[in-house]
């Protein structure tokens, strides 16, 4: 029984997560030749403030990117 685990930042819609699960299941079925009923897929969502990239959280990196974009958009 293949188990596929995905860790990702939170914020995707239910439709996006459903499409991801379907796509992953299709790849597993085609690649490993296992029946659909044997596949387990676990999505774990992590809040941006709980996900670190280097010395900063993703929340901090996103805020900095938004501030830089806003500054670049000013005349």
Image: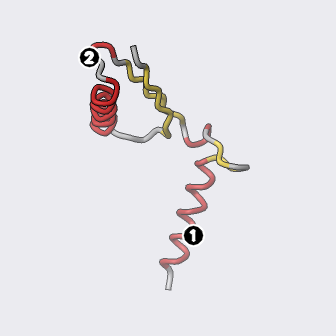
Circle nearer the N terminus (1, 2): 2
Q: Is residue 61 left or right of residue 26?
A: right
Image height of 3 relative to 49, above or below: above
Kindly give the residue lying farthest to the right in the view shown: 55
Q: For the point 29% across and 35% down, which residue is it?
A: 23
Q: For the point 57% across and 69% down, which residue is it?
A: 68
Image height of 41 relative to 59, above or below: above
Q: Name the spot of residue 12 as percent of width and height, x first.
A: 38, 40
- Residue 41, quarter of the rendered image: top left
Q: Name the spot of residue 26 as percent of width and height, x first.
A: 27, 31
Q: Name the spot of residue 25 as percent of width and height, x first.
A: 31, 28
Image height of 32 relative to 47, above or below: above
Whether the residues at callouts 1 and 2 have beta carbons within 8 Å, the answer is no
Q: Name the spot of residue 66 as percent of width and height, x first.
A: 53, 63
Q: How many marks?
A: 2
Q: Secondary structure at mark 1?
A: helix
Instruction: Give the residue at mark 1.
Output: 68
Q: Is residue 13 left or right of residue 50?
A: left
Instruction: Give the residue at mark 2.
Output: 35
Q: For the point 30% across and 18% down, which residue is it?
A: 34
Q: Is residue 65 left or right of residue 6?
A: right
Q: Is residue 52 left or right of residue 44?
A: right
Q: For the point 26% across and 16% down, which residue is it?
A: 35
Q: Secondary structure at mark 2?
A: loop
Q: In this rendering, which labeled residue sits more in front, label 1 or label 2? A: 2
């Amino acid at each position: 029984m293949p188990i596929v685990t995905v860790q990702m930042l939170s914020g995707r819609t239910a439709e996006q997560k459903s499409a991801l699960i379907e796509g992953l299941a299709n790849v597993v079925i085609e690649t490993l030749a296992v029946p659909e009923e044997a596949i387990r897929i676990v999505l774990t969502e992590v809040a941006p403030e709980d996900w670190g990239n280097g010395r900063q959280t993703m929340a901090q990196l996103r805020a900095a990117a938004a501030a830089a974009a806003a500054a670049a958009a000013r005349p």
